[in-house]
Image (spheres, rainbow, N blue to C red):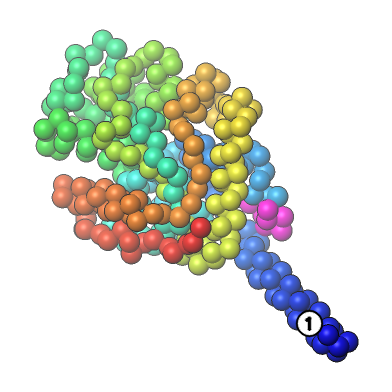
Amino acid sequence: MSANATRRAAIAILATTAAVWTRAKADAPQQLRIGFQKGSLNLALLKSYGLLEQRLPGTRIQWTEFPAGPQLLEALALGSVDLGATGDAPPVFAQAAGKDVVYVGAEPPKPDSSAVLVKPDSALKKLADLKGRRVALQKGSSAHFLTVQAVKKAGLTWADIQPMYLPPADARAAFERGSVDAWAVWDPYYAAAEISGELRALATSRGLTSNNTFYLASRALSQQPALVKTLFQALTDTDTRVRTDREDAVQRYAEFAGLPAAIVQRMVERRGAAPVGPLTPDLVREQQQVADAFAELALIPRSIRVADAIAQVKA
């Protein structure tokens, strides 16, 4: 190769490298606002480990906790956060209400991490016993869909129960004072009540729902695939650390959530591996079934097509 050809090749390589670096810098925002819930183990530990800050050193990461998915997605729709994780029902309710939220990723199912709970001495022994009873649940949450499916499995109609729409903290208080007969909720609230011996599970979500976790983003963030991939990798690396050093993960999460380690240990044990990646066609179909179930019961104002709210992010 001649000296001129070598020089041209070197310049081309430098130009390509500069372009990649420029694109990477462009994909890293000045600020990234992440919403999470007490049950968002991957996000909570991502914050604790600082893995995202390591990957996006020029970005200021802002973390905001929400009591449940509906409140988180309301903030996302209003532009107060850029990314958050919720269960299956919140994005369905948000999309049906015309909110501009976009699915960008998901975790594997956690069918043992939520349940319909009753007191140990309750007369309720099977799901059919929920007829005429007051059931506490967060409206528009994964517990809402769990309750829908529990009622259906029992051969009841939605009108056969008395749903009491309460956020988790208020629902637990109502449950403890006997103002409601049952409580549908997810971890760590489920694990906390279970460890305390204050309840028994009338049914878990296993066989009723997959209890999927979805990551939703603003329209702007969903259009930055390199940044979304960085988030996926940081979250998946977080999950790997949870599984390889469970003791450290339990301690970190216990400190974050203000919970005894025994409760967190129970939560982590039944959680399983939770790498984060794009939605599969099977997940999209399953989520459409969630949306259709709510629409059939007129629990959302209109039917929706879940695929319309999914970003095309390649793994």
Query: Height in image: 146 above or below 56?
Result: above
Pinpoint residue 112: horizontal percent, then vertical percent.
37, 29
Q: Is residue 57 magenta?
A: yes
**Is 238 in front, or is 81?**
238
Query: Height in image: 228 above or below 117?
Result: below
Query: Height in image: 175 above or below 57?
Result: above
Helix, strand or loop at mark 1: helix
- Describe residue 266's horizontal placement relative to residue 149 as left or right: right
The single residue placed furthest to the right in the displayed view is 3
Residue at 38% over, 43% down: 212
Pinpoint residue 121: horizontal percent, then vertical percent.
26, 10
**Is 215 in front, or is 182?**
215
Query: Height in image: 261 above or below 140?
Result: above
Viewport quadrant of the N terminus: bottom right
Pinpoint residue 128: horizontal percent, then vertical percent.
14, 25
Image quarter of residue 68 = top left
Residue at 51% over, 44% down: 275
Image quarter of residue 238 = top right
Pinpoint residue 230: horizontal percent, then vertical percent.
60, 56
- Describe residue 89's horizontal placement relative to residue 13 as left or right: left
Residue at 54% over, 30% down: 257
Q: Is residue 82 magenta?
A: no
- Describe residue 134's horizontal placement relative to residue 308 as left or right: left
Image quarter of residue 100 = bottom left
Q: Which residues are magenta?
A: 55-61
Dot 1 corresponds to which residue?
A: 9
In the rendered structure, which amino acid carries the disc numbered 1?
A: Ala
Is residue 152 in sight in this rendering? yes
The single residue placed furthest to the front in the displayed view is 1
**Is 133 in front, or is 306?**
306
